[in-house]
Amino acid sequence: MRIQSSHIDQYNASAIKVHENNYRITKELLAQKSIDADAVVEKLRQFQIAIPSWALGAGGTRFGRFSTGGEPGNLEQKLDDIGLLHALTRSAGAISLHIPWDIPRDAQAIKQQASELDIVFDAMNSNTFQDQKDQALSYKFGSLSHINADVRKQAVEHNIEVISYGQALGSKSITVWLADGSSFPGQLNFRRALDNTLRSLQEIYAQLPADWQLFIEYKPYEPYFYSTVIQDWGTSFLLANELGNKAYTLVDLGHHLPNTNIEQIVSTLMYRGKLGGFHFNDSKYGDDDLTVGSIKPYQLYLIFNELVYGLENNTAQNPAPAWMIDASHNLKDPLEDLIQSLEAIRLAYVQALIVDRQGLWDAQLNNDVSVGQEILQDAFRTDVRPLLQEARLRSGGVIEPIKAYRYLNIRQQLIKERGSVTVATGL
């Protein structure tokens, strides 16, 4: 299914008058604070977020999975679904592939399809947390950190293979998330496991093309529950430093213990020029992979506050981070969930853009705690949704994506095309 510009124009015609009034009011309110609303909108138009190839179907849990119907059964259909998201929101202009779930059998044809949909290829993702069919050696007791050199070699070769797929598609980065760890004291030697991991990563890094980046993800627990080899940002940062200037830490919002100050981690990594990217989601208890901004929108805003400050004061020459949604959908329509996540991310970004930086700096210099809090909360409480709508409108998207998605009966059309009992690849 493809959305035509006539469909977008038809829907926008019913919402344009209300939007124009709301944008005018918001623009005037921001002008009173010496904020140029049009300039903010233009920054927002450039802000693109990658959609992972595994997020387009019902994710489920270990207790069960409930299909939404019309799920994509191959990479071509996944690209089409991201094309739908991008046509509606004009903010989903990239895809992040997971190998071997989504191996491009005809790279040239896939590139052509993506180009037609105005989509580029973001970071590639390797998989050494599952055993694949006909795999020679098992990752049950680890991969890059495994005690057996042959298992490590197999995992290294897989990552190098992922890089080759990415090169064929025009990607410029690979994300390594390592599930390796232990569930019981005495199961492994911490230092040996970390040393094995570093040596394996060095082999992968040696095969990295000159214009590529390697992102090292971290997670404190799960699937192992006593230790994880790359358990926190400090370990990821250590490994990235050991590898070289093309290696960076990747922050997944769900990969932290409860109440971790993620915004401070962001600030520290950008201070050293080592923040490579973000995986956005939300959580109440652990790695819940809920809709972005559905549980802790203020924390998301505070994170973007540090991101915006870091990019505006980029003394360490931190590269532009790679942005990606990483969530699992078991109750909602996956495409609606992704639309809501895109909206939440862009909302937090705009809120951070309108913070009174000079006022906040002065409050901090004067130890004026109350004023500092007031300045941050004023930006957070400002309704900037009309700016998001204006950015979509100027870019050829719809003013209200969820309403338009339902107005166009997109899920029903996908079910008609693909069937009601479908399972997305990789899930």
Image (spheres, rainbow, N blue to C red):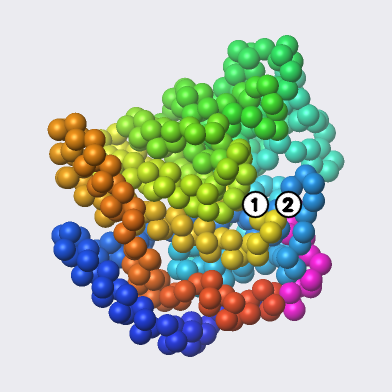
Q: Which mark is residue 60?
A: 2
Mark 1: give few (<14), some (14-19) or many (20+) Cα within 10 Å. many
Identify the element where label 1 is drawn.
loop
Q: Nearer the viewer, residue 223 or 125?
A: 223
Q: Do the residues labelled 1 and 2 touch (CB within 8 Å)?
A: yes
The answer to whether 38 appears left or right of 120 in the picture is left
Q: Which residue is drawn at 30% across and 40% down?
A: 310
Q: Residue at x 74, y 56 (%)?
A: 425
Q: Looking at this rendering, what residue extends furthest in the right direction? A: 134
Report x, y in % for residue 20.
32, 80
The answer to whether 261 appears left or right of 166 in the picture is left
Q: Name the residue under label 1.
A: 328
Rendered view: 55 above or below 361: below
Report x, y in % for residue 184.
74, 18
Mark 2: give few (<14), some (14-19) or many (20+) Cα within 10 Å. some
For badge 1, the amino acid type reads Ser
Report x, y in % for residue 210.
45, 39
